[in-house]
Image: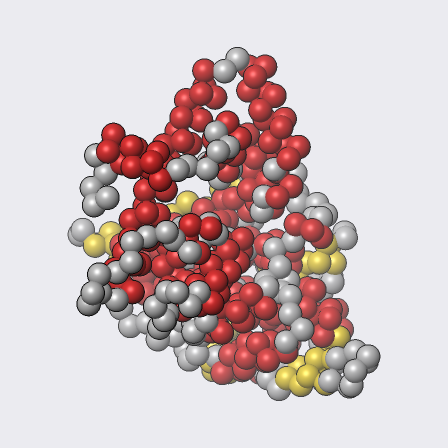
């Protein structure tokens, strides 16, 4: 998008950033970018544009930065770590003009100061940009309008980047993004500078597919389609097609449904032994309710003196999330046979895993029964069930899932699981017994039980 007018700070009542096109698909040459660092960077850039390109240094209250970057913590140490990441990240900026090419290698952001003025008084953040790129950032000639609210709804770094890239090419005639090699895209979509080779199969599965699904669920202006370019049998280059959606523009979003980046929750993950980057990645790709349940489960497990010592709480938490056995009384203190002589905690955890696998199979079976039952209902009965779900459950759902439910109902790919799980739990509310689980395992021929 090329526009020579001076960027305005707001478009109607929305916080709209005029982001330089060169700053959208950033491929770091050193360091790593994260979802929160991108949110902070966008918020700082938005306020820099409001204050003007002539200001030598920019200043903002810490509380306003927290609100606009959509995170939640009074602990400034984690905020400082992200600011350091941005200062340590080296980017290359190439521009063309009638006189030739200009290449700049610089930091993402310059000096940053946090002024804590004492109890009861507001804290302020001040920052600068490297002079070589300041004007192109604060008063860009070619830019893309980025909604801070929309950017703040994204839960993963890759989805946030793809959203901005999609917004950039939404107004282009061909609606096709840049075509680049797989390694270039992997670096841009993960914010990593240390990648030297990429297995495309895993990159597509773990990064691209999840980011596309997130943009599909959250963005109401467009969706994205992956285009693969082969050399023989190998995928060498990829790009994306931007598909506009004929829908109403995102309006004001209820404060209670904002996707707030909870730094305190990330801090709890770090306290259990996860590295900061690992904790942030886990937070970005996992439902907050599941994370809280898993943390509670691990803390209960640590307090349980009757079980062997838990040597790696972080690994146990990730396993609990992966297998879904957090948040139940049985998982917190499973009733299992004591280990035989010579056996350690691995035997007990193996029993817990088998028990949880049975519960998961049981739950899936009940959900399928609920789907079949719903199909056989009359239209009136189906509508009554939907109305009950609307009244009691929709407000508890994450914002994108709730929007998908209101749009497509039980046919929604995003919300149908939540609905049919609720139908199953309300139809058969009694907790499953050990005897029922055993009968279920025997009837289904479940191995290893």
Quadrant housing the C terminus: top left
Closer to the camera in the image, 218 or 221: 218
Identify the residue shown where x is 49% and y is 44%: 216
Identify the residue shown where x is 71% and y is 48%: 254
Number of residue marks: 0
Identify the residue shown where x is 72% and y is 85%: 115
* Percent position of residue 151, x then y: 59, 57
Q: Which colour scheme is used?
A: secondary structure
Query: In this rendering, would 57 be left or right of 379?
Result: right
* Percent position of residue 276, x then y: 47, 73
Identify the residue shown where x is 65% and y is 53%: 258
Closer to the camera in the image, 203 or 79: 79
Closer to the camera in the image, 88 or 221: 88
Q: Is residue 153 visible?
A: yes
Q: Quadrant location of residue 71?
A: bottom right
Query: In this rendering, would 272 be left or right of 74?
Result: left
* Percent position of residue 358, x then y: 32, 42
Quadrant housing the N terminus: bottom right
Q: Is residue 191 visible?
A: no
User: Is residue 278 placed above or below 385 in the rendered structure?
Assistant: below
The residue positioned farthest toward the left in the image shown: 232
């Amino acid at each position: 998008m090329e526009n020579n007018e001076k960027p305005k700070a707001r478009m109607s009542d929305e916080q709209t950033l005029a982001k330089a096109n060169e700053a959208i698909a950033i491929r770091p040459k050193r360091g790593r970018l994260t979802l929160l660092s991108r949110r902070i960077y966008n918020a700082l850039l938005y306020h820099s544009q409001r204050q003007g390109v002539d200001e030598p240094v920019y200043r903002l209250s810490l509380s306003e930065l927290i609100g606009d970057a959509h995170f939640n913590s009074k602990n400034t140490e984690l905020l400082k770590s992200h600011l350091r990441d941005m200062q340590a990240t080296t980017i290359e900026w190439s521009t063309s003009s009638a006189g030739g090419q200009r290449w700049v290698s610089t930091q993402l952001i310059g000096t940053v100061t946090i002024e804590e003025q004492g109890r009861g008084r507001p804290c302020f953040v001040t920052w600068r940009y490297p002079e070589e790129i300041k004007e192109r950032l604060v008063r860009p000639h070619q830019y893309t309008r980025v909604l801070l609210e929309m950017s703040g709804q994204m839960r993963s770094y890759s989805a946030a980047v793809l959203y901005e890239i999609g917004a950039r090419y939404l107004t282009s005639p061909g609606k096709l993004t840049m075509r680049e090699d797989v390694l270039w895209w992997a670096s841009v979509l993960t914010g990593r500078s240390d990648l030297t080779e990429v297995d495309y199969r895993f990159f597509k599965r773990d990064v691209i597919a999840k980011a596309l699904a997130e943009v599909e669920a959250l963005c109401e202006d467009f969706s994205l389609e992956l285009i693969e370019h082969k050399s023989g049998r190998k995928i060498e280059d990829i790009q994306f097609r931007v598909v506009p959606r004929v829908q109403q523009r995102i309006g004001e979003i209820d404060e209670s449904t904002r996707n707030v980046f909870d730094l305190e929750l990330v801090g709890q993950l770090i306290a259990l032994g996860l590295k900061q980057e690992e904790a942030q990645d886990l937070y970005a790709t996992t439902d907050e309710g599941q994370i809280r349940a898993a943390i509670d489960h691990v803390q209960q497990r640590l307090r349980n003196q009757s079980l062997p010592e838990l040597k790696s709480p972080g690994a146990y938490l990730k396993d609990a999330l992966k297998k879904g056995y957090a948040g139940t009384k049985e998982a917190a203190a499973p009733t299992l046979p004591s280990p035989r002589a010579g056996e350690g905690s691995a035997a007990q955890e193996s029993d817990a895993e088998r028990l949880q696998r049975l519960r998961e199979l049981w739950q899936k079976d009940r959900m399928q029964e609920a789907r079949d039952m719903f199909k056989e209902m009359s239209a009136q009965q189906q509508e009554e069930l939907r109305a009950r779900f609307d009244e009691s459950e929709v407000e508890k759902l994450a914002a994108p899932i709730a929007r998908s439910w209101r749009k497509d109902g039980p046919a929604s790919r995003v919300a149908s699981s939540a609905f049919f799980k609720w139908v199953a739990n309300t139809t058969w509310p009694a907790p499953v017994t050990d005897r029922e689980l055993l009968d279920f395992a025997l009837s289904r021929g479940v191995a290893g039980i």
